[in-house]
Image (cartoon, helix red, strand yellow):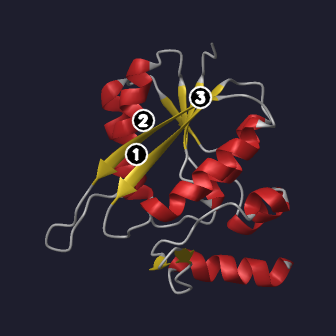
Amino acid sequence: MIKPKILIMFSGGLDSTGALWKLLHSKEEIHAHHLYLVNKENRAKAEDKAVRDIIEYCKKIRDFSYSESYHECPSYNGNFMWDSDIYNFIAGTICLSLRSIKEVAIGRTKSDTGIERRADRGTKILQTFDPDIKKIYPVGDMTKEQIYQMLPEELRILTWSCRTPIYDKDEIKNCEICRTCKELSKIKGKIN
């Protein structure tokens, strides 16, 4: 049985996939957790395939433990909880269950700006469960473009980063208008 020292909160997006990829190339035992977050952005179904495909691909690199949970967070009067609040709460509960975990990895990048207040609030939520748990940012010194270039092509095409996917019958499409879609479009245009 693997005794993980690092928990990675894994969404199946470019950033968390980059973080997972870097951790897989470390010596630390890791536990990946995906939260199926059902909220007004409606990404849970789109992330599902990406997560399953990425986990399958990465387990061929080396074994690690994996779990998932489900949380529904409806919008009230146009407001909803920040993803980071819920992720940190879930991370805290996992750390209580898997006492060998000493660090929680987040796919935060150098490109992520303006989220410091939310990140601090998330850390406080996590540390209510265990004040000694540390957060780490495996891709914190990288831009999204650098992560895109670092990942093997067959892995990066499995990621799902669109914030507001379009569902058309059995097909799921990128919206092409959210901030992440626009940023990835620029990156792909430069590289491909």
Q: Name the residue under label 3.
A: 6
> Label 2 is placed on what type of residue?
Ala
Give yes or no for contact between labels 1 and 2 (Cβ–Cβ under 8 Å).
yes
CA–CA distance between discs 1 and 2?
6 Å
Q: Answer left or right for 119 relative to 59.
A: left
Residue at image mark 2:
91
Q: Point out the tag, 3 or 1, that comes first from the N-terminus.
A: 3
**In the rendered image, the vertical position of residue 168 relative to residue 88, given as above or below:** below
Q: Residue 187 in the image: state x and y as whole percent.
A: 74, 77
User: Dot 3: few (<14), some (14–19), or many (≥20) neighbours within 10 Å?
Assistant: many
SS for dot 2:
helix
Residue picked out by circle 1: 87
Is residue 38 or residue 92 the one in the foreground?
38
Write down the quadrant of residue 42 in the picture. Answer: bottom left
Q: Could you give the CA–CA distance between mark 3 and mark 1, rounded to whole angstroms?
A: 15 Å
Under circle 1, the secondary element is helix
- Residue at the outermost front position: 170
